[in-house]
Image: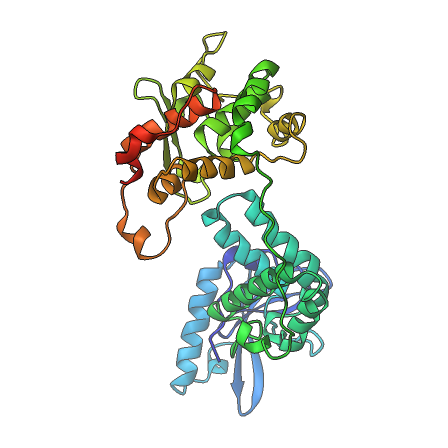
Amino acid sequence: MARRRALSAREVESIKTSGVHWVAQSLYMQVRPENGTRSWLFRCSIDGKNHWIGLGACRDVPLSDARDEADQLRIGHRRGVNPLHSRMPVPVQPEDEHTPTAPTFRECAEAYIASHAPTWKNNKHIAGWERSLADYAGPVMGSIPVDQISIDHVMKVVEPIWLAKPETARRTLSRIEHVIAWAIAAGHRAGDNPATREAVRYLLPKANRKRVRHHPAVPVSEMPALMKELEALNSTSSEALQWTILTACRTGETLGAEWSEIDLEKRLWTIPADRTKTGKEHVVPLSTTAICLLESPTGERTGLLFPGPKGRLGVMAMLQCLRGLREGATVHGMRSTFRDWCAEQGISRELAERALAHIVPGVEGAYLRSDLLEQRRPIMQSWADYCAGTGTLMQDESSIAST
């Protein structure tokens, strides 16, 4: 069985329940029920009987010292030295003594999320983990020690939603698997992981995933008219939406755009890695039309490009602006419109995907390391010209299209 990880000082400090609690190998902490006093205990077995030896009050003896002394007593005991000869045993009420249990699944889930959240993309991803584990796994196994979680518990979580909500069930199962795998690595349980696909594949029917619903997009032919309508609105929301369309970027990238990311001399917008979906910095060449959108009437060039009335523009601002003009259309769908336009112009797949900050999969993507920035400049300008109603087919850009 995997060795359990010793508790940290913070974990020890959080223990308030009366009783005897495992802290490290052979080291325990006793919390007295009558007054809440805490003391260290060393446990050893002599002639088949457990003996408890006091190592001092927690307020007087630091955790590190208690662990060192427990280690010395344990090593000496293994070498034949009876610890009772150097220390007096202390009485421990039988009802207080219990076999320490592993942390609950909920505690493990919280620990897993806390340790991995700094590397995740955004708060939405973190919230998705917390919500699915709390809503679905929590009621079934949240309070159960992680070393007692079985495949029956896992099935009680995912089986009721496997057919009704296949994508939610799949994600929940995967997250349970990760939490239990973390618990195994941390020494809180041993044996196989009961939440792997291999463990449950024969117990669950085949779930048909719902067909992917693409974001509704405005037809390419309607873009010049739409851009004129947006320009006429003369609002921060409409300007932010025009910027999003002209740069073919994502909603969150526009909402968080700051002046410090703009290089007017080189006509570039550098989106930092922590605000992109791919987690990589993305540089967007700016068209003349996009530069014109940055002409601030106050002349200020600090803070957000498109601030809202209370700081950052709301996430629904651009969508409401768009739906007031094109019912059912979505802001993200504009990226699809741009991609359709690229295809109609004969622009190469590599350039179109780089403009959208997509990761090219497979061997092709592995070898294509350049961001093709200079090749993308005329494309973004031609897209802006088309949206303004002045563009023509990029027949003279054949060299770029075949790059």
User: Who's the residue at 59% across and 76% down the image?
Assistant: 200
- Give the image's coloring scheme: rainbow
Q: Quadrant of the C terminus?
A: top left
Task: Tell me which corner region of the image, top left, top right, bottom left or bottom right, holds residue 377.
Answer: top left
Q: Is residue 82 above or below residue 22?
A: below
Q: Is residue 275 above or below residue 110?
A: above
Where residue 92 sits: x, y (%)? Answer: 65, 75
In the image, 374: left or right of 179?
Answer: left
Where residue 260 sits: x, y (%)? Answer: 40, 23
Tell me, yes or no, if residue 267 can be seen here: yes
Where residue 175 sits: x, y (%)? Answer: 57, 61
In the image, 22: left or right of 374?
Answer: right
User: Who's the residue at 44% across and 76% down the image?
Assistant: 73
Residue situated in front as seen by the camera: 232 or 61: 232
In the image, 314: left or right of 8?
Answer: right
User: Who's the residue at 62% across and 59% down the image?
Assistant: 167
Q: Is residue 313 above or below residue 179?
A: above
The furthest residue to the top: 298
Q: Is residue 183 above or below residue 294?
A: below
Tell me, yes or no, if residue 356 can be seen here: no
